[in-house]
Image (tube, helix red, strand yellow):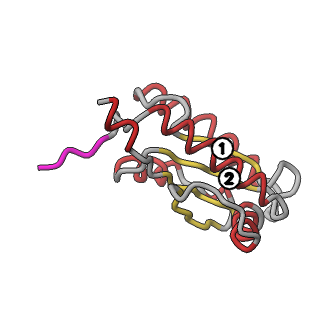
Amino acid sequence: MEEVKNTWEPKIVAFLCNWCSYAGADLAGVSRIQYPPNIRIIRVPCSGRVNPLFIMRALRQGADGILISGCHPGDCHYLSGNYFARRKFTLMNSLLNYMGVEPGRVQFSWVSASESIKFADVVKQVTQSVKALGPRQKLVKVKR
């Protein structure tokens, strides 16, 4: 089991706000800032637009971790979308905890368009924490 954990790389799905976090990720790429390749980005209009069912579906279909990232509080292009996202995230964490999914599988961050280094640091931190948790045991689809 320890051998598998050393070679295993987590699959992380990131829901990024179009205006801030996605732009920060784009700037990180343009600036050639290195971050782990484990992340798969889904661009959404606003972090408040991320439906909890998207998170559940991503986990059910094999994601080992989820990152939701949006504009800093007070900077949302849709005025209060990031506040809605923060509330949804808090409730979602409670639900996932109740279902037995380890804390740290789903994470939330604020990254603005000019914070490419912060984006790379967030991705590194999320990848390390999910890798430390190991392969997902809950919500695993049974193959028949």
Label 1 CA crowd tier, 10 Å (few <14, some 14–19, many 20+) = many
Asked if residue 38 is positioned above or below residue 129 in the image, the reply reads: below
Disc 2 marks which amino acid? Answer: Ser
Disc 1 marks which amino acid? Answer: Phe
Q: Specify the segment rendered in magenta.
A: 140-144
Q: Secondary structure at mark 2?
A: strand
Between disc 2 and disc 1, whose residue precedes?
Answer: 2
- Residue 51 placement (x, y as % from top left): 54, 53
Between the residue at mark 2 and the residue at mark 1, the CA separation in whole angstroms equals 6 Å
Q: Which residue is mark 1?
A: 108
* The N terminus sits in image quarter: top left
Q: Nearer the viewer, residue 69 or 129?
A: 129
Q: Is residue 13 magenta?
A: no
Q: Which residue is mark 2?
A: 69
In terms of image quadrants, where is residue 47?
A: bottom right
The prevailing secondary structure element of the residues shown in magenta is loop
Mark sitting on residue 81: none
Residue 62 appears left or right of 79: left
